[in-house]
Amino acid sequence: MSYTKGDVFVKKESTWGTGVDPTAPTTAVDEIIGLDSSYEYSVENQITAVNPAANAYPSEISYHTAKPSAKIDFVYNNSMPFALMLGGISGSDAQAPYTWTITPSGTPIPFTTSFLMKGANDKIVQMAGCYAKSLSFKMGLNGPVSGALEIVGKDLGIAGTEFTAPATVTLDDATAWKPHEYTYTIGEIAGITYITDLEFTISRSVDVGHGLAARSPSTAYSGKFEAVSGSLTCYIPDTATANEIEQLVLGGTSIGETLSPKDIVIDKGYVNGTADSAKITLSKCIFGDYSASFPLDTKLSYKFSFSATAVSEVLWEAPVAKTNW
């Protein structure tokens, strides 16, 4: 039987590049990036051609540095992806659900990513020394909240003996996040019910570095966070709403007004002590543009893009203590 299904696990490393095996059996949500739907991994080998002046074609191919990378697509059912991406974690509460406060950190979290493809004989691959490069967050009307995590690593082990595959995988009972479970606030605009799509991406210029003496990475660069980019789409129920949307971009009632940054808060019913709740805050958003569509036979809509300084805080009521990370 060919490979027909798979699992992907993450686990924090205490030393960068030293692989950590997934727990067997895997039951902890702190090793699962949501409800993973697909994943891919690759290794890049830098090669060049040696082409002497006397030859019309290369005399040899020279190989140089190598670097693994991966992308994991998933459906959110917890906030662990934000912990991997942002890196700053503090925790509270003596018993579950534990409050995780996740914030941007100058020092990213190194982790091991273990891939398992199941078939007649299992294929296992382990990427050690991973750092998160980007994380997306997308929600729309007729689907669960989804995302993609892009990572870069130090080493890729494909011999098939990197770890002992967990015999069983028991996911946390948290269900997929659904857009209608949230409330949305843009600055002073609260109780928003007209948003139909919302998405944003966090990215960081993290990378690995090579020395002359080795093909594999010898160090890692934490890089810097770029501005968070995103967009909102909404229908327009009335004049007051249209005016609110336009004034977010203009900063007032005309293009000469001064822009005032707004926080966007995406709240999944967060109340301290309530399991599986979360609240995401995008700080100091500036709305860069908007387009208004007025078709004759369907609903009116506005779409506007924004840039934020950071996802400044993610509050998550987790089933595992922060000490695990």
Image (cartoon, rainbow, N blue to C red):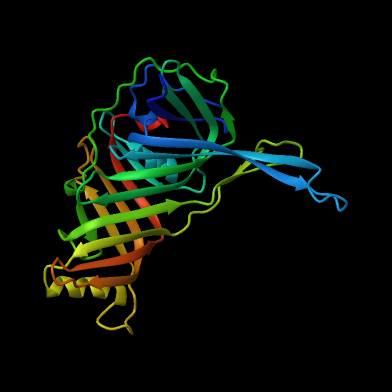
Q: Is residue 21 positioned above or below 53 on the image?
A: above
* Residue 271 percent location from the top left of the image: 20, 43
User: Is residue 87 at all visible to an observer of this figure?
Assistant: no
Corner quadrant of residue 36: top left
Q: Residue at x 11, y 71 (%)?
A: 238
Q: Residue at x 50, y 43 (%)?
A: 108
Q: Residue at x 14, y 73 (%)?
A: 240
**Residue most toward the left?**
238
* Residue 28 percent location from the top left of the image: 34, 25
State which quarter of the image contains the C terminus: top left
User: Is residue 152 at all visible to an observer of this figure?
Assistant: yes
Q: Residue at x 54, y 20 (%)?
A: 162
Corner quadrant of residue 68: top right
* Residue 102 percent location from the top left of the image: 37, 44
- Count of numbered circles on the image: 0
Q: Is residue 202 positioned above or below 219 on the image?
A: below
Left or right: 35 in relation to 69 = left
